Structure formats: structure tokens, C-alpha cells
Image: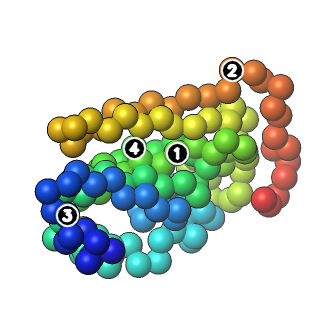
């Protein structure tokens, strides 16, 4: 990663991850966060052209500042995990997705969309996924 980022310091860069590098606020889910987030932060500090990170895994939307970089998480196109829960809990909010518009000046516009059709009903009594 460090070598690739060093190859093009003039290019605006969005970094995509699967696991979330910061706590999402769900203790059961945060135990599955990026294990080397501190190392990633140290590497990214050398590359100011990385202004945005996008992750999935947490099945909920998130928009946080991480040391001057914007960290976004996208909801799942399937079941959503309820935010701020200490135990596994499904949310009844509809499946969703995040659109991104990357601009030439390095800025980003994003929006979260949800299915309008409410036929999707997750089993909220589920104790695991």
C-alpha cells in the first residue's frame, strides 16, 4: 500500500477497505474491526492525498473524521445491524447502498439510499448471522 500511494502523490485517492478501522459503536461488531488500524493510520499520515476511506462489513452507514480523513461506511444491500448495540441485533431499517461522486478537485459527494419497498423483513429475533 505504501509503495502504491508513493507512486502517485499528485492523485486524489479514495481507499477502500472491508473491515472498519475505527469503532462503530457496537462492541460485538467492533471486535471484528481492522486489526492493524494504528499501522494503517501511521502509513496514511505520510500521504495527505488520501482524504477518504470507505468500508463495509458493519452493515450500517457511518460518516466519521479519522485524523483529518473522512471515513465512510456503507449500509448493506441485505440485513442491517442495529447501531450502538452491545449484542448482535438486526435493525428493521431497509437495505441500502451508498453512491459516491468523485470530483476532479479531490472532493467527494456521497448519499445513502434505501429500498423504498418494505417487503423485506429481517428476522429480528435472530441471534447470529
Mark 3 or mark 1, which is nearer the start of the sequence? Answer: 3
Tag 4 residue: 63
Q: CA distance from mark 3 to mark 4?
A: 26 Å
Query: Residue at 80% across / 60% down in the picture?
Result: 128
Tag 1 residue: 74
Give the structural element (helix, strand or loop) at label 2: loop
Mark 4 or mark 3, which is nearer the start of the sequence? Answer: 3
Name the mark nearer the viewer: 4 or 2.
2
Mark 3, Cα crowd under 10 Å, few <14 / some 14-19 / many 20+, is: few
Q: CA distance from mark 1 to mark 3?
A: 27 Å
Observer able to see residue 7: yes
Give the structural element (helix, strand or loop) at label 4: strand
For this rendering, which residue is in front, 3 or 71? 3
Tag 3 residue: 8
Residue 12 percent coordinates (x, y): 22, 51
Task: Name the side, left or right, on which 42 lies relative to 79.
Answer: left
Q: Quadrant of residue 48?
A: bottom left
Residue 18 percent coordinates (x, y): 52, 62
Q: Which mark is residue 116?
A: 2
Q: CA distance from mark 2 to mark 3?
A: 41 Å
For this rendering, which residue is in front, 112 or 8? 8
Mark 1 or mark 4, which is nearer the start of the sequence? Answer: 4
Task: Name the side, left or right, on which 39 lies relative to 77.
Answer: left
Q: CA distance from mark 4 to mark 2?
A: 22 Å
Name the mark nearer the viewer: 1 or 3.
3
Name the mark nearer the viewer: 3 or 4.
3
Residue 79 percent coordinates (x, y): 72, 44
> Which image quadrant: the N terminus?
bottom left
Amino acid at each position: 500500500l505504501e509503495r502504491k500511494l508513493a507512486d502517485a502523490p499528485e492523485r486524489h485517492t479514495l481507499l477502500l477497505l472491508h473491515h472498519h478501522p475505527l469503532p462503530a459503536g457496537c462492541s460485538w461488531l467492533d471486535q471484528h474491526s481492522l486489526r492493524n488500524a494504528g499501522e494503517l493510520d501511521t502509513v496514511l499520515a505520510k500521504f495527505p492525498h488520501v482524504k477518504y476511506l470507505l468500508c463495509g462489513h458493519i452493515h450500517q452507514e457511518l460518516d466519521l473524521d479519522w485524523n483529518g480523513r473522512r471515513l465512510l461506511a456503507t449500509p448493506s444491500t441485505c440485513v442491517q445491524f442495529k447501531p450502538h448495540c452491545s449484542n448482535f441485533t438486526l435493525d428493521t431499517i431497509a437495505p441500502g447502498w451508498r453512491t459516491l461522486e468523485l470530483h476532479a478537485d479531490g472532493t467527494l459527494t456521497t448519499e445513502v439510499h434505501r429500498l423504498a419497498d418494505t417487503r423485506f423483513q429481517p428476522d429480528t429475533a435472530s441471534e447470529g448471522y
